[in-house]
Image (cartoon, rainbow, N blue to C red):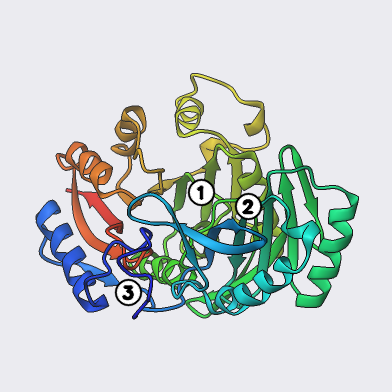
Amino acid sequence: MQCRYFKKCASCTLHDMSYAKQLEFKATTIKNEFKIKNLDIIKSKEIHFRNRAEFRIFHEDDKIFYAMHSFDKKLLKIDECLITSPAIYKIMPKLLKELSINSELKRKLFAVEFLSSSTNNLLITLIYHKKIDQLWQEEAEKLATKLKIDLIGRSKKVKKVITKESIDESFKIENISYKYFLKDNSFIQPNAFVNQQMIKWVCKNIKNLDSDLLELYCGHGNFTLPLSKKFKKVLATEISKSSIKLAKEHVKLNNITNIEFVRLSSQELIEALQQTRVFKRLRDIDLKKYNFSHIFVDPPRAGVDEKTLKFLKEFKNIIYISCNPKTLKRDLEILKDKFKIVQFAIFDQFAYTNHVECGVILTQK
């Protein structure tokens, strides 16, 4: 990819390497850091791969521009972004043109968020440093109709949904199609192509089993739904109310009956399983009916906490998805006395940056 903002825009830090060299650099770094020889490498598309993007709006005289932060921490005016998905890339100039000629929609516009699916559905959120009112809504409705987009407006303590607040996503894993709703305020993997490859990698390395799966940090069920085909039953937990609500919608949408989603933190779940605390949220779930052979964790950048790491040692198999190699290494150091690594992968969610995500499958020695 040749971007004219390379060396200027701070979002792409590996601008001086070809994509092949970037992957080689990341793979070598992980191999050396974790002292492993065999590594699965999940590539990104080299261009138009990012399905979620946010741009600041730069106001100059009576004109507006998209902007990103530069390496000197100032705002850099841009008119395109080659890493964005085809749907986002195509709509960016059209949207800016319409916003530029509409004084109501342009005034005190602070940022624009784009969310697209792998099927090119598109949701746009306009963020303001002013109160958005009825006049704004009327103009926003005209804009949504003209550009044929789904649109949301946000300002302090105000959210106005012009069309709808989610878009449809669908993809196929092992010849089974899965449907999801992507919402503007929920956590979503930013690279839809790599996300699907991540799920395929996990499913490929798990046999169909007559046992159960426990999943922590399940989000909206991104991994949970496809993995449910590999296990007899799945219990999946997440602390976010909105994510659990969405996960339950996804179960109904896909007609899956062997998953139970419950809003609990990892530490709360441990207390429930150890029968040291009773939760009303579990009143309809019999924890004794589960026969867990695997535990799946996809924690935040801070990694897995000490109490949960100790809990992981009670399982025969661990599937660990990490967005931070540093905390992953720390956690694997604690697990290595009892577990061995059987599969290790890197997922290039963020091409042209130093960031790399990892997947590790461990089994008891």
Tell me the amino acid under the disc marked 3.
Lys
Q: Position of residue 13 (x, y in %)?
A: 29, 61
Residue 182 is tagged as none
Against 237, residue 212 (above or below) is: below
Q: Badge 2, how many Cα within 10 Å: few under 14, some, many 20+?
A: many
SS category of the residue bearing label 1:
loop
Q: Which residue is tagged 1?
A: 218
Marks 2/1: CA–CA distance: 8 Å
Q: Nearer the viewer, residue 5 or 282?
A: 5
Against 57, residue 23 (above or below) is: below
Against 272, residue 117 (above or below) is: below
Marks 3/2: CA–CA distance: 27 Å
Residue 215 appearing in the image = yes
Q: Nearer the viewer, mark 3 or mark 2?
A: 3
Tell me the amino acid under the disc marked 2.
Ala
Q: Quadrant of the N terminus?
A: bottom left
Q: Position of residue 34 (x, y in %)?
A: 14, 52
Residue lying at 35% horizontally and 51% vertically, measured from the top left:
323
Tell me the amino acid under the disc marked 1.
Cys
Q: Badge 3, how many Cα within 10 Å: few under 14, some, many 20+?
A: some
Residue lying at 60% horizontally and 69% vertically, measured from the top left:
116
SS category of the residue bearing label 2:
helix
Q: Are marks 2 and 1 in contact (CB under 8 Å)?
A: yes
Give residue 301's quadrant in the image. Answer: top left
Residue 254 appearing in the image = no
Q: Nearer the viewer, residue 17 or 278?
A: 17
Q: Which residue is tagged 2?
A: 247
Q: Position of residue 192 (x, y in %)?
A: 49, 69
Side (left or right) of 130 relative to 260 = right
SS category of the residue bearing label 3:
loop
Marks 3/1: CA–CA distance: 24 Å
